[in-house]
Image: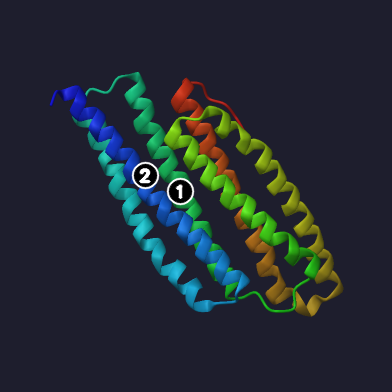
């Protein structure tokens, strides 16, 4: 196998490694939300302990990226693949951290939370999970158009967050004794909004990878 073919194979393996990490992150987000909606502390603890594997994998893949730059002679396109991969790793790792944040908050949310806000959280969660999935699909397929659609979904997530924030603040003002546990639901909404932002960042990374142009989607 020629040096170029070997390098191309290593770049392909890099993408597969990133997708392997992405799969772990997606599962942790799913589990964290399940822990929240089902009030299941065991699932929450599973998310918290599972984050160590995500962190280890991130550093392992980053090390591979650094070695590719140091030992090969990457061209402009190759460098975009490698450095975009590192940026996506960073966003995925932060998503994993926010999944842990949601899991921890899930163990503190009480039963008496406002129905108005509680109904909107699942919608926000589904949108956020869709954004993560779409961002990764765009990465795998080099799909710039799908990457750009993340902007509209992020706007919707932000809109829901604002509604949830308002509903929760009003509820806590009217029921101050609920603040110690209801405030954690507000944290959950914020963490979901942050995950959506990270998914949008991946969309921006995809656009740069394919076109070589930096575009702001947020």
Residue 65 seen anywhere in this rendered image of the structure:
no
Q: Of the residues under marks 2 and 1, which one precedes in the sequence?
A: 2
Q: Is residue 31 left or right of residue 159?
A: left
Q: Is the residue 196 above or below the residue 66 in the image?
A: below
Say which quarter of the image contains residue 122. bottom right
On residue 126, the disc is none
Pick out the residue farthest to the left: 1
Q: Is the residue 117 above or below the residue 19 in the image?
A: below
Q: Quadrant of the N terminus?
A: top left
Q: Position of residue 197 (x, y in %)?
A: 59, 44
Q: CA distance from mark 2 to mark 1?
A: 9 Å
Mark 1 nearby-residue class (10 Å; few <14, some 14–19, many ≥20): many
Mark 2 and mark 1 in contact? Answer it, CB < 8 Å.
yes
Residue 36 seen anywhere in this rendered image of the structure:
yes
Say which quarter of the image contains residue 188. bottom right
Q: Is residue 49 left or right of residue 128?
A: left
Q: Nearer the viewer, residue 107 or 8?
A: 8
Residue receiving disc 1: 92
Q: Nearer the viewer, residue 14 or 175?
A: 14
Number of residue marks: 2
Q: Secondary structure at mark 2?
A: helix
Q: Secondary structure at mark 1?
A: helix
Q: Position of residue 209 (x, y in %)?
A: 44, 27
Pick out the residue farthest to the right: 174
Q: Is the residue 129 above or below the residue 146 in the image?
A: below
Residue receiving disc 2: 18
Q: Nearer the viewer, mark 2 or mark 1?
A: 2
Which residue is painted at 51% across and 28% down in the image? 207
Which residue is painted at 50% across and 38% down in the image? 202
Q: Position of residue 88 (x, y in %)?
A: 44, 41
Which residue is painted at 32% across and 45% down in the image? 17
């Amino acid at each position: 196998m020629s040096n170029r073919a070997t390098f191309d194979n290593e770049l392909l393996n890099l993408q597969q490694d990133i997708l392997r990490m992405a799969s772990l992150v997606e599962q942790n987000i799913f589990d964290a939300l399940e822990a929240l909606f089902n009030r299941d502390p065991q699932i929450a603890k599973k998310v918290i302990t599972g984050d160590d594997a995500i962190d280890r994998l991130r550093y392992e893949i980053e090390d591979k990226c650094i070695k590719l730059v140091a030992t090969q002679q990457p061209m402009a396109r190759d460098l975009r693949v490698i450095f975009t991969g590192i940026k996506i790793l960073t966003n995925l790792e932060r998503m994993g951290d926010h999944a842990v944040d949601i899991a921890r908050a899930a163990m503190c949310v009480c039963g008496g939370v406002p129905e108005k806000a509680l109904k909107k959280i699942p919608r926000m969660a589904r949108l956020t999970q869709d954004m993560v999935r779409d961002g990764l699909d765009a990465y795998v397929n080099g799909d710039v158009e799908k990457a750009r659609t993340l902007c509209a979904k992020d706007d919707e997530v932000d809109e829901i967050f604002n509604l949830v924030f308002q509903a929760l603040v009003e509820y806590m003002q009217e029921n101050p004794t609920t603040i110690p546990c209801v405030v954690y639901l507000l944290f959950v909404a914020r963490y979901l909004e942050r995950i959506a932002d990270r998914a949008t960042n991946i969309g921006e990374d995809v656009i740069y990878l394919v076109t070589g142009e930096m575009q702001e989607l947020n």
